[in-house]
Amino acid sequence: MEITVDIESTTPMFTQLVMQIKQAVQSGQLVPGDPLPSIRQLANDLEINNKTVAKAYRLLERDAIIQPKGYRGTFVHPDAKDNCSVDLNAWVRKELTQTITAFKTAGVTDSEIRIVFADVLNQLTGV
């Protein structure tokens, strides 16, 4: 499997990596147990920052597409193919849309929503 990034694309590079790895899993190019390159190796191969690859790997791990196995490396998760169809961004968008619609119906202004949202997010992240 060949992974590439388009530095001219409006799609962030980490998103391009996530999408390509998920597509490879869905198409059968990557199967459970297959090893993935290390973060450092993939970053060097693509000539991009390690942090970009690390972010993509963290998202793929969160979604149970890949699993790190300590010093042995990172591998395709046993349930990766099933987990590729889970779209957390779509779920978050749906939930926020419902919540914001309820706020607006109650008469809350956009500004009030933004201020409270930022406050709650900062409180939850410890900023």
Image (cartoon, rainbow, N blue to C red):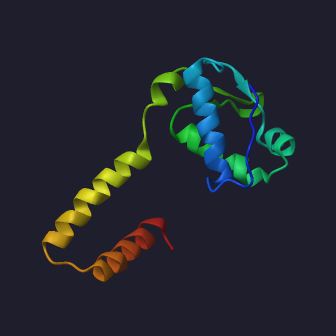
Q: Nearer the viewer, residue 124 or 103?
A: 103
Left or right of residue 38: residue 56: left
Left or right of residue 50: residue 30: left
Q: Quadrant of residue 111?
A: bottom left
* Picture coordinates of residue 27, whole percent (x, y): 58, 20
Please count the marks in the image: 0
Q: Is residue 30 above or below residue 101?
A: above
Q: Residue furthest left?
A: 106
Q: Nearer the viewer, residue 55 or 124?
A: 55
Q: Quadrant of residue 18?
A: top right
Q: Nearer the viewer, residue 38 or 30?
A: 30
Q: Is residue 68 above or below residue 96?
A: above
* Picture coordinates of residue 113, whole percent (x, y): 30, 75
Q: Give the residue drawn at x 55%, y 23%.
A: 26
Viewer can see residue 55: no
Q: Nearer the viewer, residue 4 or 59?
A: 4
Q: Residue furthest front?
A: 8
Indicate the quadrant containing the N terminus: top left, top right, bottom left or bottom right.
top right
Left or right of residue 108: residue 4: right
Q: Give the residue drawn at x 78%, y 51%.
A: 50
Viewer can see residue 65: yes
* Picture coordinates of residue 70, whole percent (x, y): 71, 33
Q: Quadrant of residue 120?
A: bottom left
* Picture coordinates of residue 61, whole percent (x, y): 58, 38
Q: Give the residue drawn at x 71%, y 52%.
A: 52
